[in-house]
């Protein structure tokens, strides 16, 4: 990795911490540049604005989640549980998405609608194969599975879990989540 790429990586990492904690409005470029050991001038040269850096940070975190937890339409319960675990391991993704929804994109798709097409197509294939209930639109199935996986996330309005919660609690949540997703989206018998 060259020096410029290393600086960009540090900015993305420092930005993820700052934006997750404070949102776009509350984040401070001074803190991000200091934490990344990159001058503010370089930050602006690379990203142009604080808002553009936020967008790059969110895109980076989404790419990480997609890489770690690819959609498995033939195993939606397992996919939901892996998302739950990913949100526990790195709660910044959910916090960043929540800030994006609050401050940047209050309605409509949070991410590009084009990004959702392959997921919907994959779920539609599982529906054709009789693995997922075909009475539900594929995009809706994906949205609901993601939302169910976020039940105990930092965006929860009932209980936000942390990695420090007792293992038995996580095991119970994983089992409950998998069972609900299985019941909700399995084809009727």
Image (cartoon, rainbow, N blue to C red):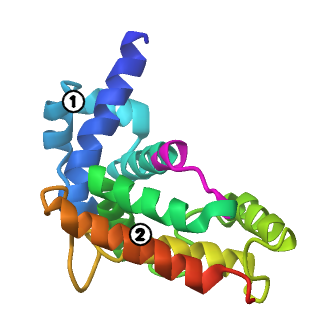
Looking at this view, name the residue that lies furthest to the right: 128
Vertical relation: 135 (above or below) 162? below
Residue 143 shown in magenta? no
Looking at this view, name the residue that lies furthest to the top: 2
Quick check: can you spot residue 134? yes
As helix, strand or loop, the secondary structure at mark 1 comes to helix
In this view of the protein, which residue sits in the foreground, 28 or 97?
A: 97
Vertical relation: 136 (above or below) 161? below
Q: Magenta residues, as a range?
A: 65-73
Residue at the spot of label 1? 36
Which residue sits at x=46%, y=49%? Answer: 65
Residue at the spot of label 2? 104
Report if the CB atoms under discs 1 and 2 are less than 8 Å apart. no
In this view of the protein, which residue sits in the foreground, 140 or 180?
A: 180
Vertical relation: 71 (above or below) 4? below
Which residue sits at x=29%, y=29%? Answer: 10
Which residue sits at x=72%, y=75%? Answer: 132
Which residue sits at x=23%, y=25%? Answer: 38
Residue 70 shown in magenta? yes
Between the C-alphas of marks 1 and 2, the distance is 24 Å
Left or right, 91 with reference to 8:
left
- The first of marks 1 and 2 along the sequence is 1
Percent coordinates x, y for residue 90 in the rendering: 29, 50
The quadrant the N terminus occupies is top left
In this view of the protein, which residue sits in the foreground, 91 or 4?
A: 91
The image quarter in which residue 142 lies: bottom right
Near mark 2 (Cα within 10 A), the count class, few <14, some 14-19 or many ≥20, is: some
Vertical relation: 37 (above or below) 154? above
Quick check: can you spot residue 91? no
Percent coordinates x, y for residue 6 in the rendering: 35, 19
As helix, strand or loop, the secondary structure at mark 2 comes to helix
Near mark 1 (Cα within 10 A), the count class, few <14, some 14-19 or many ≥20, is: many
């Amino acid at each position: 990795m060259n020096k410029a790429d290393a600086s960009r990586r540090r900015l993305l990492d420092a930005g993820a911490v700052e934006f997750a904690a404070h949102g776009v409005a509350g984040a401070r470029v001074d803190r991000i540049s200091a934490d990344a050991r990159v001058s503010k001038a370089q930050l602006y040269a690379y990203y142009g604005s604080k808002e553009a850096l936020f967008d790059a940070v969110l895109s980076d975190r989404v790419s990480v989640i997609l890489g770690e937890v690819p959609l498995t339409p033939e195993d939606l319960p397992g996919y939901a549980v892996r998302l739950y675990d990913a949100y526990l391991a790195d709660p910044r993704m959910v916090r960043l998405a929540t800030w994006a929804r609050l401050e940047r994109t209050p309605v409509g798709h949070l991410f590009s609608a084009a990004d959702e097409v392959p997921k919907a197509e994959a779920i539609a294939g599982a529906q054709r194969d009789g693995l997922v209930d075909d009475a539900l639109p594929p995009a809706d199935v994906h949205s609901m599975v993601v939302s169910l996986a976020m039940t105990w996330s930092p965006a929860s309005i009932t209980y936000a879990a942390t990695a420090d919660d007792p293992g038995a609690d996580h095991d119970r949540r994983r089992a409950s989540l998998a069972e609900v997703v299985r019941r909700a989206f399995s084809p009727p018998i």
